[in-house]
Image: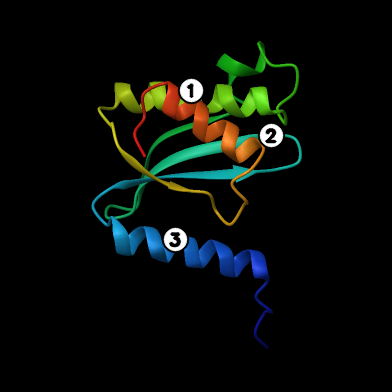
Amino acid sequence: MPIKETAFDRRKRRGRHKLKKVSPERVRLTIFRSSKHIYAQIIDDAKGVTLVSASSVDKDLKKSLKSGSSKDAAKAVGALVAQRAKAAKITAVSFDRSGYLYHGRVKALADGAREAGLAF
């Protein structure tokens, strides 16, 4: 019996399809947002590997953050993932919001990454 696909799953699939269609050569900055933390990864879909990752659970950030679920934490994670991407010689990415609305913590993470020098 097939599992029912949710509207969230359709948004996620539709967004990733558009990214692969528009810029297949670019790596993808994808996010995952839970109720307590936020995570970001830069993925090379051609090779199927994660190149860079950062989250509000990282030891570097956890000490300095009050909460892992705030906009400040998201902005810090965005800046950290951009910093690690620069170290890995990655300058441009496609932003995959993973079905989440571009609002709140998702927008804060994107702004933090852009301010740190990541182009998308």
Amino acid at circle 2: His
- Give the labeled residue for mark 3: 16
- Residue 66 in the image, given as x and y percentages of width and height: 75, 16
User: For mark 2, what is the residue?
Assistant: 37
Give residue 116's quadrant in the image. top left
Q: Earlier in the sequence, mark 3 or mark 1?
A: 3
Q: Residue at x 55, y 61 (%)?
A: 12
Which residue is found at the position 65% from the left and 36% from the top? 105
Of residue 61 and residue 20, the one placed in the foreground of this image is 20
**Left or right of 96 on screen, residue 64:** right
User: What amino acid is at disc 3?
Assistant: Arg
The amino acid type found where label 1 is placed reads Ala
- Residue 72: quadrant of the picture: top right
Mark 3 to mark 1: distance in Å? Answer: 23 Å
* Picture coordinates of residue 37, whole percent (x, y): 69, 34
Q: Of tags 1 and 2, which is closer to the observer?
A: 1
Q: In terms of secondary structure, where does tag 3 sit? A: helix
Q: Regarding mark 1 in the picture, which secondary structure is present there?
A: helix
